[in-house]
Amino acid sequence: MPGKILIVDDEKAIVKGLKYGLESDGMSVDAAYDGEEALDKIQNGDYDIILLDVMLPKVDGMEVCRQVRTFSEVPIVFLTARGDDMEKILGLEAGADDYITKPFNVLEVRARIRGIMRRSRRAAVPEVKDRTIRNGEFCFDPENRRLTIAEREISLTSKEYEILEILVTHPRKIYSRDDLLRLVWGENFSGDARTVDVHVRRLREKIEKTPGEPKYVQTKWGAGYFYRG
């Protein structure tokens, strides 16, 4: 599954190891070693995924992620220190889609990237019928991975989209945080359920007029989340 990936890390040994492993999968790999270089390459490049270290010279990874989210929804996977849960949560809040803890196994990184790319490219498969879901001003088009509300297009990250797609295509079905973690991040994901909460909160901020009183993505206390069709 060819793709173009940017690795951003100031540790050249990590970049070298990841680059070798990903190129073995037939992927095109570019590298940046500080935040300024990363932003320049992202603005002028066309990447399928960005692997982004948090601790970077010049501009840190969190700020790089925030700036990227002002002009692109490219999937961003943070590389974080093991056990630093707050760092992971801040990364998700900044707009990251996923995170991998250091030290990591290159095979895990390769598998995670292949999974992200498979999900992000599902829209390329032709659909026989119109599967657009409409609910008043809400219009969800899974064939083209497009969401509009009151005719305004809403830009979502890949993980936000995948959560919404699961809920919208199964209206009123309640999904626990563990269900969504397994379906969106995969069986081998090592994170916890707070990852889901962060993404749902960000999703609501984009699609709800009043995020504290959601109309579309609702909570069943003690059970999970559901879409009110």
Image (cartoon, rainbow, N blue to C red):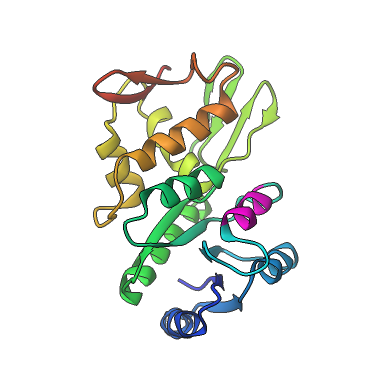
Tell me: 56 left or right of 181: right
In the image, residue 64 lies in the stretch drawn in magenta? yes
Chief secondary structure of the magenta span? helix
* Of residues 66 and 120, the one drawn nearer to the viewer in this rendering: 66
> Which of the 4 image quarters holds residue 221?
top left
Q: Which residue lies at the image location 38% right of the left edge and 61% below the top edge?
A: 100
Q: Quadrant of the C terminus?
A: top left
Looking at the rendered image, the quarter that the N terminus falls into is: bottom left
Q: Residue at x 45, y 86 (%)?
A: 20
117 relative to 203, above or below: below
Q: Position of residue 140 (x, y in %)?
A: 54, 30
Can residue 57 be seen here? The reply is yes
Q: Position of residue 59 (x, y in %)?
A: 66, 62
Residue at position x 29%, y 35% from top?
Answer: 177
Give coordinates of residue 14: x percent, y percent.
45, 80
Q: Is residue 130 visible?
A: no
Q: Residue at x 61, y 66 (%)?
A: 47
Q: Quadrant of residue 102?
A: bottom left
Residue 193 image position (x, y, % from top left): 30, 40
Say how many tags the image has.
0
For residue 178, side relative to residue 135 (left or right): left
Q: Is residue 74 left or right of residue 114?
A: right
Is residue 11 placed above or below 155 in the rendered structure?
Answer: below
Residue 57 among magenta residues: no
On screen, residue 208 versus residue 172, left or right, reads: right
Instruction: Specify the segment rendered in magenta.
Output: 62-69
Q: Is residue 183 above or below residue 98?
A: above
